[in-house]
Amino acid sequence: MTGHTPLTPGATRRLASGTLRYFLDRDVDLDLGRDEGENEDGGEDGGEVLPNGSGQPKHSGQASPAQPAPVAKEAPGDRATPAIPVGPAGPSSSPRRRATDARGLLTLGWHGPCEPIIQPYSGPASPYWASKGFLGLLMPAGHPVWTAAEEALPAETADAVTVLGPPAMLIQSTAADGLVRLHNHGSNHVGEDDDPGYSRYAYSTRTGFTTTDQAGARPGRPLASPRDNHFALIIDGECTPRGPATPLASGPGWVASVTAPLPGVRIVSATMAHGRAEIRVHLVVGADAGTRVRQTGWACTPGRRTHGAPERRTGRASQPAVQPIAQLHPLHGYTGTARQLVAGPTMFGPGARVLALDGVTTAPESLFVSLASLTAEPDPAPAAALADIQVGGPRTIHVTWQDGTTAVLRLPELPEER
């Protein structure tokens, strides 16, 4: 490359070490790993967040008994230490979840066959990305990865919200139930098919995205399934896809992006997180007055309980493993309360349900604000109790969280407005 100055070996190593440290620290935030039984819903048994369509190699990397994080020794730091179980001595949920078939082979899918996450480039060898997980076995027997006392992951000791600026994502974890949620404002891999592995506003360790239920489809008429964690305009009875999301800005506890679902229409979206509360904000710019909108929440399967894991460990005591409960509450701009929609299957099974809020645009700039929650705590308080907001104009929101702390969100300007 003309004008390019080659890096010295020392500079190259420092750059690689810094990059590796960044991703290892994020892995600590994303993975709540514990060997507490066959918790098929993920979370504290080493389950993964699935924020993109490359779930197959991601599953495979988690599937082996030796994950690659011991390379942390090449990136000095103080977060992902050998005693934190992100390496070979840490958890591996996939083998216990029957990811292999009757022949003992890994299958194309999630924890078992799962067609929706298979990509066009996937092949029979894709599950065997798992082989890369054995890198840690190169460590000698006396290495701290094998000998150090296991430490708690950061998110096991306290609730946490971590902003990932470059990819425009927000990691939200809660210690009480071991759930990790990833709020996605950097989807730039979404085509006309609106790939659910990239287009959802949020993903978690214990929920999957909705997919088309082909079992009830007729020739030429696929059975549509409501998109989970989605905000759409409703045009001629159809919800608009999200399309690519352009990151706008981020700050403490929040991240924002913009999408263009229709020519001349922009949706400025932001997510704020605190504890288990999620405030979802959408400013619709340029849509005709009277345009219907819809916000959906998490896809959960009613009555489904964690299999094979009657208890889970917390810092206080063992608790029953339960199916997460989704909540969705209107705060501004919506009409009425949330209603339940029947959805298609997710990678966690059939019969999912999705909560939805509806509203109508009333001005050139229409603001819609809701409060969502996903929790595995027993008998959770209503979402309405988690936060109180005051709208200070179409682009400013003042928040008082349940614990009394406050925050202010000022939606960023669009690029053409700057």
Image: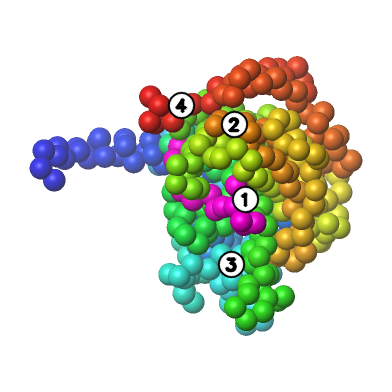
Q: Mark 1 points at which residue?
A: 234
Residue 291 versus residue 353 in the image, above or below: above
Label 4 belongs to which residue?
Answer: 413
- Label whose residue precedes the other's in the sequence (1 or 4): 1
Kind of residue sitting beneath label 3? Pro
Helix, strand or loop for disc 1: strand
- Amino acid type at circle 4 is Glu
Q: Do the residues labelled 4 and 2 touch (CB within 8 Å)?
A: no
Is 28 rendered above or below residue 367? below
Residue most extreme to the front:
289
Precedes in sequence: disc 1 or disc 2:
1
Helix, strand or loop under label 3: helix
User: Residue 363 shows which numbered tag?
Assistant: 2
Q: Which residue is drawn at 76% across and 49% down?
A: 355
Residue linked to disc 3: 116
Q: Where is residue 367 in the image (x, y as percent from the top left)?
A: 62, 31
**SS at badge 4:** loop
Q: Do the residues labelled 1 and 4 touch (CB within 8 Å)?
A: no
Residue located 82% across and 28% down the image:
385
Magenta region: which residues?
233-247
Q: In which quarter of the image is the C terminus?
A: top left
